[in-house]
Amino acid sequence: MERIAVCIVCDEAGSLFEGGETLPRFGGAGLHMYLLGKGLARNPDYDVRFIFLYTEPTELRDDAISFIWLKGLQSGLRRKVAKFLPGSQERLRAYPYQDLPEKRVFITTMADFAPHLIEQAGLAGAKTIFQTACELDVTEPYERTAEDGAMLLDRIASCDEVFVQTETQQANLKSNRDRDSLVVHKGWEAPSARPSIEGRESVLWVGSAQMVKQPWLLFDTARLLPEVSFVGVMPPAVKSVTDYALRQAAELPNVTLIDRQLGYAEVQEYFDSAAVYIYTTEFGTHPELTVMQAALGGAALVSERLDPDRMFTEKGCGIITGVGANRLAEGIQRMLSDFALRQTYTQNAFDYIAESYSYSEMIDTYTKVIDGFFEK
């Protein structure tokens, strides 16, 4: 059987591969694409590659996945052959894809990557799948002018398939661009059994240094609970936010701040040992990967304001405290002081995420769509 080239356009995933630990990462999009690529690479009929637009992946290593660095390939070839082959620019731009199997699918996430997906897939003659990363991908792309945002929405709507994460996103894309889409949940591989919550005491916060994550709530809440140990895992994103976090942590003896990138397995170890995970993201209707990691690791969920998938109010997966550090502190105290309550919430959250956000189901859905592109 002829193999299918599955190419994922996502520079943010580079830091998760062996040899790429120092490369930049922004939020959970890179982790989502990394996990997707690893799952698809288990299929012997797929030739999985990651395409990097600006990140140099020359040191990356993986037994099942290979890498394409567009900037390096194209600039090197241009210097060598442009003067001998007038009018060769288009062929040079498509050169990185010449050795791919004829059946090709390109995938990306995050609105900013949609134009690159369309461009590179056009050069390669590939089908396209766009996966939303957040609510704004189908309403108002993050930190964009109205004109640029509209352009990104047009690019997203033009893909062969669009995967959204919630019915809300599905309705918004239909309303904004009259485009149908498929709800595909992110997935995380669950352990075979619920973890024990015995002996846990710390409170964990995990998120990149962005305002949308509301990192000040970590520090404001820690001030209100000086007897509780807090751990903040906050890899760099926005320098001013990182600088603020470092200043705050220096003043708080009960806060340990980790301001560098960690591998997702290392981060999971923090979830596996925390008593409580505080979820302070400002907006969203689907559980982020950190929520999944916390639920599957046995850290009790305390949300300041969000109720993704109504998992708190309808599924009993944790506490929604209400807005502000004072209410968040009250919710943490309640969770830490009542072991039976915490056990109930952690069991509910584990079962819900394991059932509703199955890693294998995510891979199966992608596989069905990818194979469907080429069925006769």
Image (cartoon, rainbow, N blue to C red):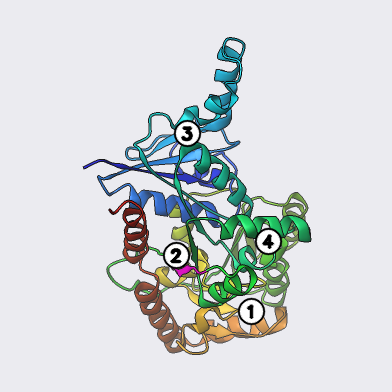
Asked which quadrant contains residue 251, the reply is: bottom right
Q: Is residue 123 above or below residue 367?
A: above
Q: Is residue 302 magenta?
A: no
As shown in the figure, which amino acid type bears the numbered disc 1? Glu
**Mark 3 secondary-structure assignment:** strand
Q: Quadrant of the N terminus?
A: top left
Mark closer to the observer (1, 4): 4
Q: Kindly identify which residue carries mark 1.
A: 304
Mark closer to the observer (3, 2): 3
Query: Around disc 4, counting alpha carbons within 10 Å, would you say few (fewer than 14), some (14 to 19), or many (20 or more)?
Result: many
Q: How far apart in space, not on screen, are marks 1 and 2 (Cα)? A: 22 Å
Q: Kindly identify which residue carries mark 2.
A: 186
As shown in the figure, which amino acid type bears the numbered disc 3? Ile
Query: Residue 61 location in percent, x, y?
Result: 40, 34
Q: Which residues are magenta?
A: 180-184
Mark closer to the observer (1, 3): 3
**Residue 307 or residue 120, whichever sits in front:** 120
User: Which residue appears at 57% of the width and 42% of the height?
Assistant: 119
Mark closer to the observer (1, 2): 2
Q: Is residue 111 above or below residue 20?
A: below
**Residue 15 or residue 285, whichever sits in front:** 285
In the image: residue 260, left or right of residue 310:
right
